[in-house]
Amino acid sequence: MANRILAITGPTSGIGESTVKELANDYDIIILLCRNIDKGEHLKSLLIAEHKKLNVEVIQCDLSNLANVMKAATQILDQYPYIDCLINNAGVVSLTRQKTVDGFELMFGTNYLGHFLLTHILFESIMRSHDKQIIIVSSGAYKYAHIGHHNFKYPLRFNPIKSYSRSKLATLYFMQELYEQFHHRGLNVTAVHPGAVSTNLGKTKYNHRFGDLIYKMFDSMFISPREGAMSTIKVTKDKFLFNGAYVYEGKVTELENQGLNYYDRKRLIRETLEALQLDQFMYLSTN
């Protein structure tokens, strides 16, 4: 029987780490796409200690650097014939205006563009697999922004809430476009909002004290990373039930209006292809 292969971004802490640990029994090979290699190697040792037959690969992948994303994806293609499930889990929050090495606003460039390119390069490999599954960890924050214009230019003015929300709205549109174009070819794709999860998301060396204060103030409102990971795990195990859906805390949830704007979605996808210099939406040699 063929090996089942999982690839996941942002696996070394929070929801990602809990997801990987819970799914370790379901896959033969797990590819950890990490920004921090040392943390990836530490997680690998923990997983192998618990699951002796599990094959774990650590690949450096900084989603804010498109060249690095291409390098990581190419390494996967060189080593593995297919990917059964890709979980686009990694996410970043920045309270200050920051730029990726490619000149995009950090959150939009990381949360959306980095994952878009990764998925594009791996897409044919995913479609060769048995499961043909992509899971996108999104957020209910999509409600607080419209996709607007000028997403691919570094902003002169910056609102962290709107910028984060816009990046997560873009991931929802990405899921919808994947479903619309490829579900009839067997692709199973789902967007997951895990809920208000207590993680290190948004805390940096510049705002660590502020971040700790916020988490302490609202601690009773947060669920644990393990609880948050259960949505992703549930979708992974029942891909047909949740195909094309937005899932909140393990349940299919109806999107609000700004998450359903067809024309904004089509414009975003078109502009994304132009920004990344791609000829088509997701590469398939049989297109």
Image (spheres, helix red, strand yellow):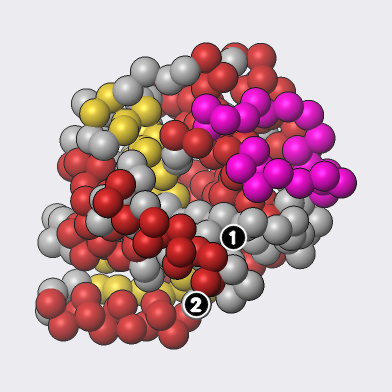
Q: Is residue 200 magenta?
A: no
Instruction: Relative to 161, say whether 68 is above or below.
Output: below
Figure quadrant of residue 1: bottom left
- CA gap, disc 1 and disc 2: 12 Å
Q: Is residue 277 visible?
A: no
Q: Is residue 274 left or right of residue 143?
A: right
Q: Which amino acid does label 1 sit on?
A: Leu
| Mark 1, residue position | 63
Counting labels gives 2
**What percent of the width, then of the height, locates residue 280?**
67, 34
Magenta residue span: 142-163
Q: What residue type is labelled 2?
A: Asn
Residue farthest to the front? 217
Residue drawn at x 53%, y 32% as measured from the top left: 142
Residue drawn at x 58%, y 76% as measured from the top left: 205
Placement of the C terminus among the 4 image quadrants: top right
Q: Is residue 151 magenta?
A: yes
Residue drawn at x 73%, y 51% as measured from the top left: 105
**What percent of the width, then of the height, locates residue 92?**
55, 57
**Callout 2 secondary element:** loop
Mark closest to the chain's N terminus, 1 or 2: 2
**Callout 1 secondary element:** loop
